[in-house]
Structure formats: structure tokens, C-alpha cells
Image: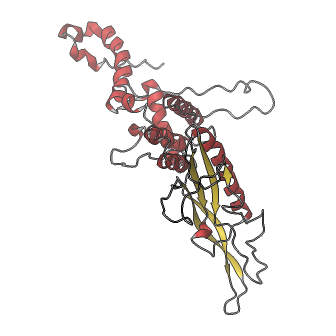
């Protein structure tokens, strides 16, 4: 029969008078072990959780409510938002386990495990910590008047929450709209199209993948001014009714934001859009229209254009045709401009 091991007295006894260090004070030494584990635990007494001293020493309390979560990374890491969900699976698991050691996220019990059949997959400590962190970021977003998209990754939520407050200072300006669009839609964005390679040295013609950058810019058009001239031909003529492009003599002229989506083939004529590229561009154009309708200043309007308008097909090339309307070709400023 094994003899139970006598627990080691708490090291906190050194803070008490010497009278409590005698052999008759075993109860006090064991009782203080409870507080020592809670405050300075560095073993498995708390199921891997850190003690309160570790939380304060690592700056967890001060950094938990900032999306960078600096206490999870080395002090030498100078990235603005070090990745978590964008890391390799083993590194992501390690960081989430470190976070769980501070927080102690309980793993939900699967209620179907006691039933026969094929129960649903049980939650893991990693998935429980991910769900907790995801909910924390949603809560933090509410403090900066932001509702994170449910489709965003953990890193995307952290990045947007960290920057959106500074963007509020630029709200209503072309720069502010441009910064917000780039932040929310991950712009400039790299897209992969195809390029045509003509036959060379007996080799047949072929297509190869090519990468290009898709950008979005926001600007204000120069308002028309009334020119002063002593010549009849160039003098300003006041019409009975306003005509587009004419200066505004009286009244209010709504301010306009020109939003331009520039495709890779604007800078590289060899870049040929694929069907997937076109769908991605159309989705971006639709999302821009929805976003701008919400964030634009009151009594303003916007236009969305796509540049370039069309790329001509390669002559005698059955491998790729870059001028199939609705498939891999978009009409540009005049044909695909949306005004609101």
C-alpha cells in the first residue's frame, strides 16, 4: 500500500512570522498553497493556466483589449499586426494554446456523444479559443462603431479594428474613402490572368499564367468654373436650364466622388482577363456600390468606372480570346460606370 505524499509547504510562509514555520503549522503551509497556485502558478496545478502574476507581468490585461495582442509575440516582432490565422497550422495552434493558457477558454461539451449513431465532431481546445477570440474581436469592433464581417478571418478583423479609428478622422474625404476601401477589400489586389505566347522554334502557341495588380482610386472632379472673356465666342452664356458640365451660377451642386477600378491590363497589354477575373471584378464593383452608398457624405454622389474599356483579341489565336463580352471582357468608363 502506497503512502500518500505530503505536500510541500507554501513558499509564502517566508512572509509570515517565524512562529508559523514550525512543524505544527503544516495546515497554514498547505492552505497558502492555494493562493500561491492562483497567483504565481508555473506548473500544471491550474491545468496549464497562468497565474495572476504571469498575467500582469506579460502585460496581458493592458494589451488584451487592443487587437494586436502583443503579449502573444516576441518583443522583437515589429509587425503592425502579427498574423495568427494566416500562420501555418502548427504555429497557429501554438499561439492559440498560449492565449488559452492566459484565458482558460472552456471547451464546450458535445451533447450528442451519449447517443448512438454518428455524433457530431467534438470541439477542440483550438476551435474553442478561436471562437472566443472571434467573439472578443466582434465586441471590440462595437467600441469603434464597427460591425466586423462574419466572413473575415481573425487577422482581417484585427487589422481593420486597429486602423478604422484613425480613418474616421479622414471620413468624407477622397483620401479617407480610398484608405477605407483598400482596407476592407484588401487592395491593391493581385489577380492571375493569362498571357499569350506565340509559337517559337517549332513549339506551339500557348498561354501562361500572369499576375497583375488591381487597384481602386477615389478622386474629386474639378468643378467647372465661369470664365471671364471679352469675346463673344468664349464668353459664358447663362441658359434657362442647367446643362451637364456647365458651371453652377446659383444653387447647390452635389459633390461627386469618382471611383476608378484599374485593371492589370491597363499597364500591361499582354494581360488577358479570365472568366474568374471578370467575376471577381464584378463582385468588387457591386461591393463598392453598396459600401459607398453607406459611407459617402450626405448630399453627395459617386461614380464607379472600370479601366481599361476593352482589350482587343490576339489575331488568329484560338487559345485565348480577350474580347468575349460578359465572359472575359468588361466595358469601361462609358459602359460600366455606375452613378449614385
Q: In front: 37, or 135?
A: 135
The percent position of residue 83, horizontal first and vertical second, equals 48, 47
Left or right placement of residue 230 versus residue 147 in this view: left
Q: Position of residue 42 (x, y in %)?
A: 37, 29
Residue farthest toward the left in the current orientation of the protein: 18
Relative vertical location of residue 318 with respect to residue 119 in this rendering, above or below: below
Q: Is residue 145 left or right of residue 209?
A: left
Observer-nearest of 46 and 30: 46
| Above or below for 306 versus 315 | above
Count the marks: how many? 0
Q: Position of residue 279 (x, y in %)?
A: 72, 57
Identify the residue shown where x is 78% and y is 62%: 326
- Residue 140 position (above or below residue 262): above
Q: In this orientation, which residue lies closer to the viewer: 99 or 22? A: 99
On screen, residue 176 versus residue 263, left or right, reads left
Q: Residue at x 73, y 72 (%)?
A: 322
| Image coordinates for residue 210, horizontal then vertical, percent | 62, 71
Specify the color scheme.
secondary structure
Residue pushed farthest right? 117
Q: Nearer the viewer, residue 251 or 264?
A: 251
Q: Quadrant of residue 15?
A: top left
Q: Is residue 17 above or below residue 235?
A: above
- At 36% from the left and 49% from the top, the residue drawn is 78
Seen as rendered, the residue at the extreme bottom is: 201
237 relative to 332 in the view: left or right: left
State the image quarter where residue 156 is shown.
Answer: top right
Amino acid at each position: 500500500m502506497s503512502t500518500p505524499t505530503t505536500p510541500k509547504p507554501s513558499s509564502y510562509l517566508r512572509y509570515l512570522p517565524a512562529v508559523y514555520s514550525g512543524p505544527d503549522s503544516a495546515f497554514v503551509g498547505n492552505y497558502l498553497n492555494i493562493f500561491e497556485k492562483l497567483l504565481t502558478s508555473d506548473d500544471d496545478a491550474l491545468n496549464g493556466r497562468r497565474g495572476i502574476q504571469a498575467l500582469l507581468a506579460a502585460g496581458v490585461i493592458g494589451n488584451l483589449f487592443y487587437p494586436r495582442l502583443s503579449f502573444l509575440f516576441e518583443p522583437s516582432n515589429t509587425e503592425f499586426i502579427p498574423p495568427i490565422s494566416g500562420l501555418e497550422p502548427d504555429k497557429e495552434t501554438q499561439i492559440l494554446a498560449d492565449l488559452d493558457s492566459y484565458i482558460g477558454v472552456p471547451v464546450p461539451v458535445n451533447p450528442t456523444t451519449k447517443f448512438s449513431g454518428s455524433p457530431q465532431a467534438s470541439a477542440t481546445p483550438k476551435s474553442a479559443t478561436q471562437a472566443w477570440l472571434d467573439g472578443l474581436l466582434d465586441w471590440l469592433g462595437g467600441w469603434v462603431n464597427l460591425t466586423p464581417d462574419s466572413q473575415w478571418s481573425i487577422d482581417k478583423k484585427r487589422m481593420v479594428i486597429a486602423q478604422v479609428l484613425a480613418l474616421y478622422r479622414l471620413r468624407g474625404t477622397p483620401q479617407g474613402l480610398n484608405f477605407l476601401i483598400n482596407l476592407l477589400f484588401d487592395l491593391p489586389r493581385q489577380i492571375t490572368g493569362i498571357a499569350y505566347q506565340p509559337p517559337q522554334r517549332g513549339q506551339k502557341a500557348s498561354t501562361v499564367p500572369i499576375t497583375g495588380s488591381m487597384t481602386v482610386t477615389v478622386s474629386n472632379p474639378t468643378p467647372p468654373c465661369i470664365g471671364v472673356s471679352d469675346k463673344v465666342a468664349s464668353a459664358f452664356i447663362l441658359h434657362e436650364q442647367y446643362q451637364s458640365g456647365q458651371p453652377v451660377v446659383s444653387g447647390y451642386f452635389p459633390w461627386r466622388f469618382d471611383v476608378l477600378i484599374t485593371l492589370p491590363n491597363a499597364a500591361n497589354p499582354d494581360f488577358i482577363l479570365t472568366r474568374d477575373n471578370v467575376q471577381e471584378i464584378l463582385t468588387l464593383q457591386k461591393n463598392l456600390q453598396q459600401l459607398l452608398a453607406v459611407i459617402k457624405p450626405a448630399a453627395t454622389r459617386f461614380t464607379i468606372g472600370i479601366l481599361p474599356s476593352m482589350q482587343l483579341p490576339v489575331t488568329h489565336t484560338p487559345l485565348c480570346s480577350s474580347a468575349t463580352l460578359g465572359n472575359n471582357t468588361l466595358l469601361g468608363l462609358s459602359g460600366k460606370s455606375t452613378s449614385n
